[in-house]
Image (tube, rainbow, N blue to C red):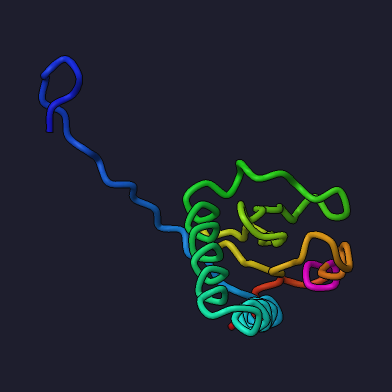
Amino acid sequence: MADAAGEASREIPAVTSRRIIFHRDAAAEAEAAAGWYEERGKGLGADFVGELERVSALVVESPRIWPRSTADARARFAPFARLPYALVFVELAGDEVVVIAVAHGRRRPSYWLRRVAPGDPSDDVR
C-alpha cells in the first residue's frame, strides 16, 4: 500500500491480549434488549447486537478512554452511538474487562452497583 506521497506503507494489525467477559446479569440484559428491539421491528434486534459488538470491541481496544462512574470510580461507561444504552464495565488484573451491565441510559441509574462491590465482578461471569 502507498501513502499520499507515494511511499510504501504497511498496516500494523492491532494486537491486544485483553478479553471481555459479560457478567451473567449483563448478558441477560443484552439478550432482553435485543429481543425487545426485534419485537418492535424485524432486524432491530440484530442492529442492537451489532452496536453491542462494536462498542465491546472499542472497550477491549482502549478501556481507559471511557469516563468513570461518579457512583463507583472502578466502573466506566461506554455509550452506544445510536441507542440509549451503555456498557458499564470494570477492568481486572490480567487484562480482563468485565461488563457488569448493559444499561439503558434513561432507566434505573446505578442499579448495577451491587455487581461491583464488595467482591470481584468476575465471580458472576457467563
Residue 88 appears in the rendering: no
Report if residue 101 is visible in the image: yes
| Residue stretch in magenta | 113-117
Q: Nearer the viewer, residue 123 or 113?
A: 113
Farthest residue toward the top? 5
**Could you say which is closer to the camera, residue 55 or residue 66?**
55
Residue 37 lies left or right of residue 50; in this view the side is right
Which residue lies at the image location 62% right of the left edge and 55% below the top edge?
82
Q: Is residue 78 left or right of residue 94?
A: right
What x and y, as percent, mark residue 62? 52, 46
Quarter of the rendering containing residue 102 = bottom right
Identify the residue at horizontal 11%, vertical 19% (top origin). 6
Dominant SS of magenta comes to helix
Question: Image height check: is 122 above or below 90?
Answer: below
Is residue 14 shown above or below 84?
above
Give the quadrant of residue 110.
bottom right
Whether the magenta-drawn stretch holds residue 71 is answered as no
The percent position of residue 120, horizontal first and vertical second, equals: 72, 71
Task: Check the image and report above or below for 57 versus 63.
Answer: below
Observer-nearest of 37 and 57 = 37
Q: Position of residue 121 (x, y in %)?
A: 70, 72
Give the residue displayed 71% in from the left and 69% down from the top.
101
